[in-house]
Structures are given as C-alpha cells and as structure tokens.
Amino acid sequence: MAAAYTLYAKPGFAATTIERLCTEARISNRAFYECFGGREELLQALHERCVDETIAAVSKALQEAPQELDERIRAGISSYIGFATADWRRARIMHVEVRRSGDVLTASRQRAIESFARMVEDVTDSFPDPAPVNRHLLALGVIGALQELLIEWVLAEEPPSIEELVAAAVHIFHRSFSNQVIT
C-alpha cells in the first residue's frame, strides 16, 4: 500500500506496473497477488482508504465546529481541503488519478461522492432560506467545484494557496445554497 500510495500519485496509475510496485515494496509478484487481484484492486483499496480518512476528518471537524451555519460550512470545507492537501499524494489520488484510471474506480468514486453529498445535505438542512432547486443536485455541484479546485492545486505550476482554495469553496457553497435564483 505504501509503495502504491507514492507510485500511483507519481508517476501515476497508468505508468505504474506491478513489477515496479513489487520492486518498490520489496516483495515478490507472488506476494503481491496473494494480497490483491491486480493493480486495479490495489488502487481501489488505496482510494477507499483515502476517502474513509477524509470523511472521518471532515466528520470530526463538523462535530467540533460551533453550531452556527457559517462556522460549520467553513469548518467542513477547511477540513476537507486541509486534509486532502496535507499530503499531495492523497490529493492527487483522490482528484486526479481517480479520473485517469478509467472505469477502474467508477463505483468507488460514486460511493465517495454520495457520502460527501450526504454530508453537504446534512449541513445545508439548516439553511434559513434554502434555494428553490434540488438540494442533492446542488450538493453534487458543490462537490464537483471543490474537486476542480483541488485538481488546480495539484496540477498548477503555481498552485493557489490553501486559504484561496477555502475562500473560493466557501463562496461557491454560499452562492449555491442561497435563496437567490439566477435566470
């Protein structure tokens, strides 16, 4: 897992062979296949671990946040961005390699998005004047925007600061769930 964490982040999933994984991990190909059915299964396990750890960090931040809505929103977003960017490999696997892996992570990615969407919906249940559109679709849109912000952070030659990412994400969140309808 440790070797895959680094190699799947850079040079990336597509460029990482089982032989390279085994060499880096100092294990035989046979030992690899005793643990995983292939490099795709290893990527799925790694992705799910990253997602589970991120969900735990965000859940903890939301539980510890003051009950004021703005504080909860900022705490959740700050926690997500902070945890994802605390290790560039995590950010890259969760937001870049998950898309580059083709169909390998489709189900795992959808489960992760649904989990995060439920978190967003739970937080926004207490919005004073909810937007007059489907709350689940708004949650998915906010998650998509947050993913794109993190992809920018991972891939940009001069990545934005974490503070800029948080400010942009909080702004998007508020604008998405306000009661203003833009036509």
Image: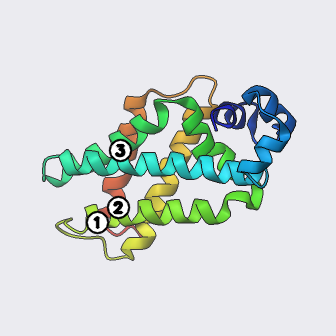
SS assignment at label 2: helix
In this rendered view, identify the residue nearer to me: 102 or 4: 4
Tag 1–tag 2 contact (CB < 8 Å):
yes
Left or right: 10 in relation to 171: right
- Residue 182: name its quadrant: bottom left
Q: CA distance from mark 3 to mark 2?
A: 12 Å
Seen at 36% across and 72% down, the residue is 135
* Label placed on residue 119: 2
- Closer to viewer: mark 3 or mark 1: 3
Left or right: 180 in relation to 23: left
Judging by the rendered image, the residue that carries numbered circle 1 is 122
Seen at 81% across and 37% down, the residue is 16
SS assignment at label 1: helix
Q: CA distance from mark 1 to mark 2?
A: 5 Å
* Label placed on residue 57: 3
Q: Position of residue 161 (x, y in %)?
A: 44, 26
* Label placed on residue 82: none
Q: Amino acid at mark 1?
A: Asp
- Closer to viewer: mark 3 or mark 2: 3
Tag 3–tag 2 contact (CB < 8 Å):
no
Q: Position of residue 71 (x, y in %)?
A: 19, 46
Q: Is residue 138 visible?
A: yes
In the depicted structure, whether residue 86 falls above or below residue 34? above
